[in-house]
Amino acid sequence: MGAAIAGLGMTELGKVYGRSPRRLAADAVRLAVTDAGLELKDLDGLLVSHGLGGSPGIELAQTLGLRDLRVLSLMHAFGATAGAMVAHAAMLVQSGAADTVACVFADAPLKPEQSSGAAYDRSAREYYGYGGMTASQGFRSVNAYYALAARRHMARYGTTSEQLGAIAVSTRQWATMNPLAQMRDPITIEDHQNSRWVVEPLHLLDCCLVSNGAVAVVVTRADRAADLAQPPVHVLGWGQGHPGHAMERGSGFGLTTGAAVSGPTAMKMAGITVSDVDQCQIYDCYTITTLLTLEDYGFCAKGEGGALAASGALGPGGRLPTNTGGGQLSGYYMWGMTPVSEAVVQARGQGGERQAERNEVVLVSGNGGILDHHSTLILSPTRPGAGARAGR
């Protein structure tokens, strides 16, 4: 039977004020349903992702006026949630437990007259027990832990700040061609190196944006999607990985991620190998996340992610187009819905100036927590067993 993404809805993204996460989520669901050529009454499933700025909650169903839903759930695995929601929706429609499922993420952490950094500021929180020991050493933010991961990778493999900068630069190159991207001015390695430290070795340009907004997709049966308004984006495979790194000697933190588990699982389900992937949409909360994830998927050997980025492979004209909408570093930060939304655009062939040459197999990656949770999707414009993909 198969499942496909039939609709995509995106509100305004970035410094969007005056709407709650629930209102933003409702707008995104309506847009996604309209995009698919459907009506709200056609939905019989709704999956909602929790955001840090406030969850829309399952009360969203009432806001939308939905009745007699067969599935209604709040899912939460941080940045891995979007991939998990799409996978869950695909299983629902393939099993017959639901026919048409909307998946939505919404967040509104930005406030007027407040810096982006203040949106996730945890410095004022109270710490207890061993948490106070790490806080006293400066570990009061997610930034510090990702910096620790980057430092460990550098120490083990010789990865450099300039190589991380190459990821920031290639991602911005894609963003210059995306009208929805928040940051569209080109940057250079020198710009990256001159941007202020956030937590050494991470510069400002190693870190993602903060955005308000919402993104939703509609998942239904592949045969039904073929008759709807947009080109269907087939969900060929999915997987999750949760390494559970302990912050102690011998841990793989900073060296491996859950992509090493979720990637092979999704690719096996889709019947592909890493060599079949045409482009990647990677959860890039930090440049080091992109690097680690690409290594763990097998696009290069462990420790060679920096060289891969520095080669220009990830940018326009490269052999592995990655984060073609500007990702979360330069596009917009909608947790795992950032890579999912761009994958849908690319698989449909609707990327305009930034459309990658090849889009038969699009890998989508979600990362949650501090490299704690991972989800992978394999998407394609071609239904399994038909057309170009079958002949690869």
Image (cartoon, rainbow, N blue to C red):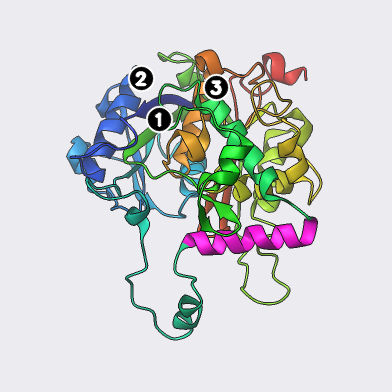
Q: Secondary structure at mark 3?
A: helix
Q: Which residue is mark 2?
A: 35
- In depth, the one of 364 and 41 nearer the eye is 364
Whether residue 193 is visible to the viewer of this picture, yes or no, is: yes
Q: Which segment is the magenta one?
A: 142-157
State how far apart marks 1 and 2 are (Cα): 9 Å
Give the amino acid type for the residue marked by disc 3 in the picture. Gln
- The one nearer the camera, 107 or 62, is 107
317 over 121 or under it: above or below: above
For marks 3 and 1 on the same chain, the one whose residue lies earlier in the sequence? 1
Q: Is residue 11 left or right of residue 162?
A: left
* Residue 295 in the image, given as x and y percentages of width and height: 73, 46
Label 1 environment density (alpha carbons within 10 Å; few <14, some 14–19, many ≥20): many
Measured Cα–Cα span from mark 3 to mark 1: 16 Å
Q: Is residue 237 above or below residue 227?
A: below
Q: Are marks 2 and 3 in contact (CB under 8 Å)?
A: no
- In terms of secondary structure, where does tag 2 sit? helix
Q: What's the mark number on residue 218? A: 1
**Mark 1 vs 2: CB contact within 8 A:** yes
Q: Is residue 157 left or right of residue 24?
A: right
**Do the residues bearing badges 3 and 1 touch, measured as CB atoms within 8 Å?**
no
CA gap, disc 2 to disc 3? Answer: 16 Å
Q: Is residue 144 magenta?
A: yes
Q: Mark 3 sits on what residue?
A: 346
